Image (cartoon, rainbow, N blue to C red):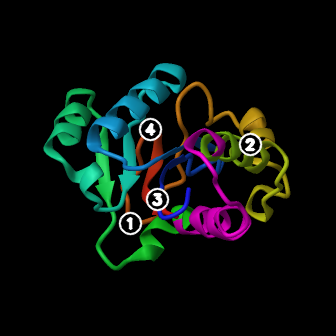
Amino acid sequence: MHGTQLKWLSIVDEHTRECLTLKCDRSITSEDVIDTLAELFAMRGVPAHIRSDNGPEFTANAIQRWLEQLDVGVLYIEPGSPWQNGYAESFHSRLRDEFLAVEEFETMVAARKLTAAWRDDYNHYRPHSSLGYQTPAEYAASSPHSAPELASATPQQAPPLRGGCQINQPVPS
């Protein structure tokens, strides 16, 4: 898609490292985030919190009100503090190096198909040293904390919560 900027919305489980959602589009709005989270919450349960950077699609009043109605806390990382979002930084590094730097997208349909295939490979065929060399899917299947509610391995600074997912700003192509 020559000259067209694409963005990816990723949602990663902090405990299992599963990429729960990886959506590709020309733009990502707060409404897109709400729709994506609603689908995910319907499938996996409503988490106690989400962790996010301060992108406008995550700080919009609409998403804050919606999450508040569901009693979902939001842990925003401090600007310029990528270490507070280490799982996301690691995931996005792999996304860039293993996927975005390798693939060329001729159409939006092709970009979405390739994105889905990469997500499947990441979750089911790519072992992680931090998971004892299991894939995220294998680890999730063996973890009592991962289903049906989203699990969380929050940094020490964050209060212990009953579960959560990590949400990350769209990755520009």
Q: Residue at x 47, y 39 (%)?
A: 163
Q: Measured along the vertical axis of the image, is residue 77 above or below residue 125?
A: below
Q: Which residue position holds label 4?
A: 162
Can you identify the residue that label 1 sits on?
157
Find the residue positioned furthest to the bottom: 80
- Where disc 4 sits, the SS reads loop
Q: Secondary structure at mark 1?
A: loop
In the picture of the structure, the residue carrying the numbered disc 3 is 4
Instruction: Using the image, determine if residue 94 lies above or below residue 24.
Output: below
- Magenta extent: 89-110
Mark 4 or 3, closer to the camera: 3
Q: Residues within 10 Å of mark 2 (few under 14, many from 20)?
A: few
Q: Please tell me whether mark 4 or mark 2 is closer to you in this view.
A: 2
Pair 3/2: label in front:
3
Asked if the stretch drawn in magenta spans residue 16, the answer is: no
Real-space CA distance between mark 3 and mark 2, rounded to the nearest whole angstrom: 21 Å
Q: Quadrant of residue 64?
A: top left
Report the disc number at residue 117.
2
Which of pointers 4 and 2 lies earlier in the amino acid sequence? 2
